Image (cartoon, grey):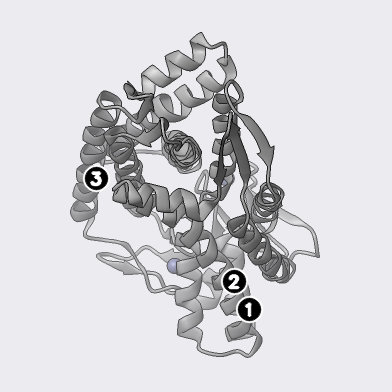
């Protein structure tokens, strides 16, 4: 059975959950209906993000030119280098933010996308909403490594010693961007099945 | 019927339906099931966000004008400013990275600040209801893309990488940036969409 009320993801106002397309009575945004399109958008964005994740981890995110000899660091390479230097906390932070958080976000979105069609009740529904909430909070933190590379590329910029960003950095920001779009498409989706009555 | 729905709120975290009650100043309404914050005293929260958005605008300008850190390696000297970082990315043809950094570190935070100011102006004089609606929606999108706090943490991480072979002095903007992040988290990012919309309906529908 459909719930009686539905929460607007934009303005949080409570709306009646009628048949078909529901426009929020307060902010006029479309908050429900035409579900397949949104679902497909979420999938497309997620798959794009995953492809960029693979590219971001394969290609160097940072290029270090020291007196003409060039060394390149991938994300994992950078983490290992930090670990070897003894900067354990920073190595862990970068690993969590750049490698683990995006993966976690992928799995959470995948879980929500593959489970949303099954009939859900009570606690499971709450789990999904909680999971979504977590992805929203942790998602942006994966940008740390891109910022660090940008900062290093700005200050280590001397004649013979120079740091520049790598292709991996471009793939990484695109990954973050598409993951955010995918999550946004889901939030709108979740509403219809997921607003609970009292 | 519409009046009735305005008195309801669904918890963002666990989706439980609640009935809103009027709150005394400085009190917070929490979800009965999961304890997540639902809303607080709306007039107070909005007034605070507006007055602190002027503060944060000044801090943001200072943070952009002066160097955040000075880096010395032997006889070489370089500086980190937010504009120099973005121009470095663009001059090295990292247009995608440069654009995203520009959006999340400069454009989105400024959009948040100016949205608050515009919203204050509109609601104070009770002008264009539809424009106010668009500004609230825009403010919420801008807020989810504003990442100055994460950028500030990244500077600390970058410092750890630089400590080994460079001497680092902190610039004026380091303090401005730290204060900006504090004000941003405490007052600009803490106000909830539902609080803004409640404030909005109180102003325009006199509820
Ligand atoms: Zn709405
Ligand atoms: Zn709750």
At 45% from the left and 68% from the top, the residue drawn is B138
Chain containing the residue with disc 2: B
Residue labelled with disc 2 = B116
Depth check: give the residue in front, B121 or A197.
B121
Mark 1 crowdedness (10 Å alpha carbons): few <14, some 14-19, many ≥20: some
Residue labelled with disc 3 = A45
At 29% from the left and 26% from the top, the residue drawn is A57
Q: Give left or right: position of A43 versus A31.
A: left
Classify B21 as above or below B69: below
The quarter of the picture where the C terminus of chain B appears is: bottom right
Depth check: give the residue in front, A87 or B88.
B88
**C-alpha span from label 2 to label 1:** 6 Å
Chain containing the residue with disc 1: B
Q: Give coordinates of residue B114: x percent, y percent.
A: 56, 72
Classify A127 as above or below B21: above
Classify A105 as above or below A38: above
Classify B141 as above or below A25: above
Q: Give left or right: position of B179 versus A88.
A: right
Residue labelled with disc 1 = B120
**SS at circle 2:** helix
Q: Verify CB contact (< 8 Å) between mark 2 and mark 1.
A: yes
**SS at circle 3:** helix
Mark 3 CB lies closer than 8 A to ligand 1: no
Q: Give coordinates of residue B169: x percent, y percent.
A: 68, 38
Chain containing the residue with disc 3: A
Q: Is residue A178 visible?
A: yes
């Amino acid at each position: 059975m459909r719930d009686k009320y539905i929460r607007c993801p934009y303005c949080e106002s409570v709306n009646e959950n009628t048949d078909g397309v529901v426009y929020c009575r307060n902010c006029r945004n479309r908050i429900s209906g035409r579900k397949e399109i949104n679902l497909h958008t979420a999938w497309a964005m997620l798959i794009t993000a995953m492809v960029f994740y693979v590219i971001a981890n394969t290609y160097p995110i940072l290029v270090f030119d020291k007196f003409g000899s060039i060394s390149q660091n991938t994300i994992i390479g950078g983490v290992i280098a930090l670990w070897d230097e003894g900067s354990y906390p920073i190595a862990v932070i970068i690993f969590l933010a750049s490698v683990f958080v995006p993966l976690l976000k992928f799995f959470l979105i995948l879980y929500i996308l593959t489970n949303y069609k099954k009939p859900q009740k009570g606690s499971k529904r709450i789990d999904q909403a909680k999971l979504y909430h977590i992805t929203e909070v942790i998602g942006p933190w994966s940008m740390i490594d891109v910022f660090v590379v940008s900062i290093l590329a700005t200050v280590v910029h001397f004649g013979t010693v120079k740091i520049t960003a790598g292709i991996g950095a471009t793939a990484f920001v695109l990954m973050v961007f598409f993951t955010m779009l995918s999550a946004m498409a889901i939030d709108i989706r979740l509403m219809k099945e997921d607003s609970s009555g009292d | 019927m519409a009046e009735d729905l305005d008195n309801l709120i669904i918890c963002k975290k666990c989706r439980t339906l609640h009935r809103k009650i009027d709150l005394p100043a400085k009190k917070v309404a929490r979800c009965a099931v999961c304890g997540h914050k639902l809303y607080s005293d709306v007039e107070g929260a909005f007034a605070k966000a507006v007055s602190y958005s002027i503060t944060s605008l000044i801090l943001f300008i200072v943070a952009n004008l002066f160097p955040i850190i000075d880096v010395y390696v032997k006889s070489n000297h370089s500086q980190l400013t937010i504009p120099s970082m973005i121009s470095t990315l663009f001059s090295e043809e990292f247009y995608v990275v440069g654009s995203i950094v520009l959006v999340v570190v400069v454009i989105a935070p400024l959009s948040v600040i100016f949205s608050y100011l515009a919203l204050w102006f509109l609601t104070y004089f009770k002008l264009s209801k539809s424009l106010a609606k668009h500004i609230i929606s825009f403010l919420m999108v801008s807020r989810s893309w504003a990442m100055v706090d994460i950028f500030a943490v990244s500077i600390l991480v970058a410092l750890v990488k630089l400590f080994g072979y460079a001497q680092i002095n902190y610039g004026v903007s380091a303090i401005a940036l730290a204060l900006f992040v504090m004000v941003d988290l405490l007052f600009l990012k803490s106000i909830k969409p539902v609080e803004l919309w409640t404030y909005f309906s109180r102003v325009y529908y006199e509820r």
